[in-house]
Amino acid sequence: MPAIVLIGAQWGDEGKGKVTDLLGERVDYVVRYQGGNNAGHTVITPDGQKYALHLLPSGVLTPGCVPVIGNGVVIDPKVLLTELDGLAARGVDASKLLISTDAHLIMPHHRALDRVVERYLGSSRIGTTGRGIGPAYGDKIARMGIRVQDLLDPGIFRKKLELVLREKNQILFKVYNRKPIDVDAVVEEYLGYAERLRPYIADTRLILGKALEADKTVLLEGAQATLLDVDHGTYPFVTSSNPTAGGACVGSGIPPTRISQVIGVIKAYTTRVGSGPFPTELFDSNGQHLLKIGGEYGTTTGRERRCGWFDAVVGRYSARVNGITDLVVTKLDVLSGLEKLPVCVAYEIDGERVDEMPMTQTAFHHAKPIYEELPGWDEDISKCRTEAELPENARRYIERIEELCGVRVSAVGVGPGRDENVVRHPLI
């Protein structure tokens, strides 16, 4: 079987874990290919149990599925072990987990620098989670990173850490007036993590390659989403990695010729966390409705998400950049009870209509939404399981999203539960 890529088609928090459930037992491996514990998946099991995952791919909750943390992820080992312990306490077996030897580690100096730089930027801050993700990726590109495999060689680990802290401690102390980080304390802490992580560390590129050759199904799961991609998102208000479909190959070691399908997950409205432009953002009672009924609070940070109407310009852009073959529209139920549903079909920028994503950051900051208004519905749709059971206006809303984005909508989420979906076309 070829590989399948699962991506967020907006600014994140679209409900990607739901799709892993829709694919169910047909998935043999679920690979997290980028990001760190600045992201999160909220998954609700059939028995009503709610799980908040930060580093682990959502497949860890699917019996028989092998969860994989790929080389493109940056890992805070303490967070990962806490997450594993939390699952174990709830009876979830995560013993099949595989961690790439080439994934980079988030170190104490990364977290320290992330927090102090954000404070230093003041009103110009990016809105990071302060968890060290950006500095960890920065060191990776600067070839100063420390990888998972370094935990297996205490001598190499110490040598690399001493070299890195020679510079980082100077910055922390002389520039930001913070205490230097003690090498011995970090070595002791991280080598303690090494003993617990050792059984999971593997050559994941090789394992995944052999799995595909053996006709296994591999799902590549991105964190964050398209508009937060460091290259293709609303830079600089982005994450430090590539959540788009192209990043799946780099972050997993699976070649693009193996990928046959790209599933894009998109909310029936739009949200984003942190700073940056957001043309359809709402500041009225409708925005409060989306926030409260949608439970729009960050899985990782608990921050309120900014809420707005559906943005088809973003949808079209995401479909094109990722090569999306199927859309899954989530949280359609949140729109129940709203009389009118504006959909952004284009932008007005400096008096001119723009149908595609603006070319520059300046233009996007000045973009004003041009709306097309669709009628709403009052019915509770959470019990709907077929398209015919949806209210007529709900069907029309989905059909219009399909038309505007230029991609078929294969499934629709009508509630938070794993089984609360309407499947219009099989995903595999």
Image (cartoon, rainbow, N blue to C red):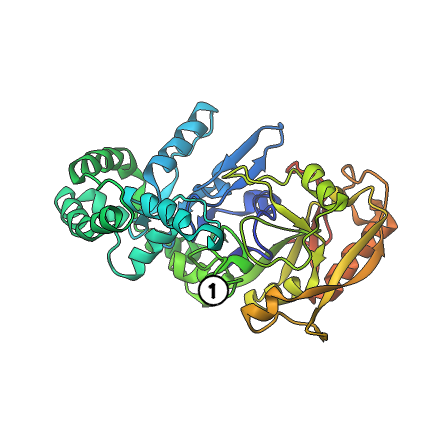
Q: Viewed as shown, does residue 58 lie left or right of 133?
A: right
How crowded pointer 1 is (Cα within 10 Å; few <14, some 14-19, many 20+) is rated as some
Q: Residue furthest bottom?
A: 352
Q: Disc 1 residue type? A: Gly
User: Where does the image place residue 297, in percent across and percent down from the top left?
Assistant: 59, 39
Q: Say whether residue 273 is visible.
A: yes
Q: Position of residue 273 (x, y in %)?
A: 56, 48
Count of number-bearing discs: 1
User: Which residue in the protein does label 1 denote?
Assistant: 246
Element carrying mark 1: helix
Q: Is residue 214 placed above or below 318 in the rendered structure?
A: above
Residue 226 falls left or right of residue 331: left
Nearer to the camera, 367 or 354: 367
Q: Is residue 63 visible?
A: no
Tell me the residue at 43%/62% (across/down): 249
Q: Is residue 90 left or right of residue 145?
A: right
Residue at position x 27%, y 51% from top? 175
User: Residue 182 in the image: x percent, y percent?
Assistant: 19, 38
- Quadrant of the snapshot with the C terminus: bottom right
Q: Is residue 135 above or below residue 234?
A: above
Rendering coords of residue 33 (x, y %):
43, 53
Residue at the spot 45% in from the left edge and 49% down from the top edge: 128
Residue drawn at the location 12% of the way across and 44% of the way down: 155
